[in-house]
Image: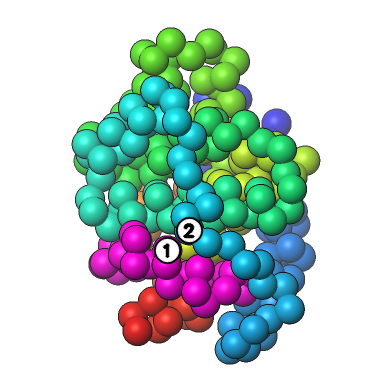
Amino acid sequence: MQIGRQAWMAQTSGDLFLKDRMLLLSHSLFPVLKQSIKMYSLAKRSRPNAQHELHLDDLILPDSVDVQRALEEMQSCSSASLQNHCLRTWCYAIAFAKMQNMQCDDELLAVSCLLHDLGMTEPHYQHHQDCRCFAGQGAYAAKDWSLEQGWQPPRADQLFDVISMHMNPYVGLDEGIEAHLLQQAASCDVIGSRGFEFSHQFRQQLQQQYPRLNFNQAMIEFTQQEAHERPKSRTAMLVNSGFKQLVNLNPYVKEYRK
């Protein structure tokens, strides 16, 4: 039973037991360390070899009714800084897909990115009474929303898993392309991981289009509150592992402020 998936969430309510903590750490330690080493070693270089010449104009949200409704749902309950984070996350996710020639479900990826932090909003923080994890709360809220839009249950379940798993420190491709892309993109925006793969110009375009505002401080405050209220959650594990420091050490934040 994979941590973060709907079956795991239903059984544990989002609480991490010792075995789950060890599994998460063993599964994520090497890839996260590898990404971190690259991030900090390449962040100061003006033209890393791994850069890709993408332009923000190349990234267009899928033209579908469900994507538009997901955008409206996200905007209806999210702060301006959280809205911009969700949109930047989608840009990074689809950019990673393009750079690696990944064939993904574009609509599912877009909806997942737009709705992935519903659990941080006031209307959905307590969306499901038997869940003690904001990512799980957001996943339940997104699943319920998708069913209201007429999605078939298997696709709604997939949406749940993609969103809920994004709080794992690392999600591999073998766990689903969309889940992998969302987790990598959210991490890229929050702590800067894999940011070195993009040119300064692209990051600057993204920041100008979707300003960061007070997102970093809001994220730190929210995760600390979550860790206090839900001490067995994945969020608490990340906070206790130095999440605040990782956010503050994001090597691209100073760049964003220029």
Taking the image as shown, residue 72 lies to the left or right of residue 235, namely: left
In the picture of the structure, the residue carrying the numbered disc 2 is 56
Mark 2, Cα crowd under 10 Å, few <14 / some 14-19 / many 20+, is some
Q: Residue at x 57, y 48 (%)?
A: 94
Name the kind of residue labelled 2 in the image. Leu
Q: Which residues are magenta?
A: 191-220
Q: Was residue 215 drawn as part of the magenta stretch in this picture?
A: yes
Residue at 59% from the left image edge and 54% from the top image edge: 95
Q: Residue at x 64, y 54 (%)?
A: 96
- Picture quarter with the N terminus: top right
Residue 172 circle label = none
Q: In this rendering, does residue 6 appear at all?
A: no
Q: Is residue 158 magenta?
A: no
Is 138 on the left-hand or right-hand side of 214?
A: right
Which one is nearer the viewer's eye here, 6 or 228?
6
| Residue at image mark 1 | 206
Q: Nearer the viewer, residue 70 or 209?
A: 209
Residue 120 drawn at (x, y percent): 32, 46
Foreground residue among 254 and 245: 254
Evaluate if marks 2 and 1 touch, with contact meaning CB atoms under 8 Å apart: yes
Q: Is residue 105 above or below residue 252?
A: above
